[in-house]
Image: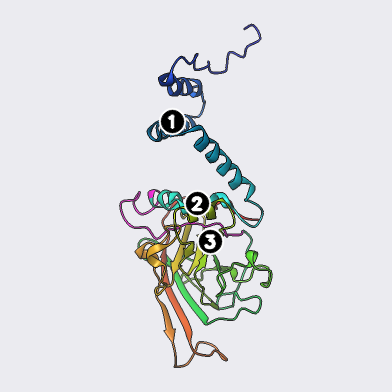
């Protein structure tokens, strides 16, 4: 005892029976200096222990669960984040997003999942320019958006990250035939709060299923598909960072998104044009247009950690 560090929390006590376990763990963790850390870990332990009791978790099931978590870690690498994918596929990402946006979950939100494919340092791109950086066959898409504050006033100087899958349903980091940063770009809103660009219409795609999340989906007899969408991230000091997705309105998977990411506010108007004068020369029918109005609220401008390098 003489060499003990008396600044450390005492242990939880000797365990005599089943009902002693949870209180002992909570006592042992009670000395955490950070109040929020104590709150989070206290709740985590209580709910995990309650889950084990409610389901009468077997040792074999416990070992399977630990191995599943280990496999998630092993499946995560520089170009793929299995942990984010798992959180998405069990609806936790959407739940946290809605709890922290849309009037604390009381109303639908225009925010959405970051997803596992955002990359930092997308190339700065002039308004009106194309984010197609290598041959990418597919219907051409012309996007024209505006960013405003809650009162409807345009916000100038917002950096807007855009990223999307190709018409075959792959992001460039998944597809060696695409150039680096293909279908990605960073735009800055002008004095009218506007930004615009040229791209190709995105396609729906299956999430990666060669890891533990794929095994889970097959065991649950769930399809792995996401409806077609484009990602947007708006950043400007003084405003809460906006992370959202705009879904293609005629996609067959809108009502069964594998990661539960579709809300009605996120369904866009991807208008098809089979005639008329296209916005640029050499554009063949059909071509599409998307217009959208984003609202950014005052708050802290915090960029998320990129899930991939």
Q: Which residues are magenta?
A: 99-119
Report the residue marked by disc 3.
207
Distance between the alpha carbons at the discs numbered 2 and 1: 22 Å
Residues under numbered marks 2 and 1 in contact, where contact means CB atoms less than 8 Å apart: no
Give the SS element for disc 2: helix
Residue closer to the observer: 152 or 185? 185
Crowd class of label 3 (few under 14; some 14 to 19; many from 20; radius 10 Å): some
Residue closer to the observer: 284 or 153? 284
Report the residue marked by disc 1.
49
Outermost residue, bottom direction?
276
On screen, residue 60 versus residue 79, left or right, reads left
Compared to residue 177, the image places residue 244 above or below, namely: above
Q: Earlier in the sequence, mark 1 or mark 3?
A: 1
Give the SS element for disc 1: helix
Distance between the alpha carbons at the discs numbered 1 and 3: 31 Å
Q: Earlier in the sequence, mark 2 or mark 3?
A: 3
């Amino acid at each position: 005892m003489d060499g003990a560090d008396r600044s450390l929390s005492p242990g939880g006590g000797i365990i005599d029976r089943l009902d002693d376990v949870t209180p002992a763990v909570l006592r042992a963790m009670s000395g955490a200096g950070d109040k929020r850390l104590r709150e989070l870990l206290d709740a985590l332990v209580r709910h995990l222990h309650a889950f084990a009791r409610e389901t009468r978790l077997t040792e074999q099931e416990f070992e399977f669960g630990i191995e599943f978590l280990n496999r998630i870690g092993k499946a995560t690498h520089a170009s793929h984040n299995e942990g984010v994918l798992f959180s998405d596929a069990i609806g936790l990402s959407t739940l946290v997003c809605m709890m922290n946006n849309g009037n604390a979950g009381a109303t639908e939100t225009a925010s959405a999942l970051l997803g596992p494919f955002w990359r930092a340092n997308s190339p700065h791109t002039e308004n009106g320019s194309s984010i197609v950086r290598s041959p990418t066959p597919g219907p051409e898409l012309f996007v024209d958006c505006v960013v405003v504050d809650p009162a409807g006033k345009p916000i100038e100087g917002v950096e807007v990250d855009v990223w999307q899958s190709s018409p075959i349903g792959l992001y460039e980091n998944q597809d060696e035939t695409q150039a680096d940063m293909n279908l990605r770009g960073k735009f800055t809103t002008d004095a009218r709060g506007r930004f615009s660009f040229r791209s190709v219409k995105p396609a729906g795609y299956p999430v990666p299923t060669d890891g533990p999340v794929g095994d889970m989906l097959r065991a649950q007899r769930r399809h792995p598909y996401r409806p077609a969408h484009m990602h947007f991230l708006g950043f400007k000091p003084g405003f809460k960072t906006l992370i959202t997705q705009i879904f293609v309105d005629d996609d067959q998977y809108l009502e069964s998104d594998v990661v539960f990411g579709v809300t009605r506010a996120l369904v866009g108007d991807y208008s098809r044009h089979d005639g008329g004068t296209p916005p640029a020369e050499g554009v063949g029918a059909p071509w599409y247009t998307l217009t959208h109005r984003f609202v950014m609220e005052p708050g802290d401008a915090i960029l998320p950690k990129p899930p991939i390098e």
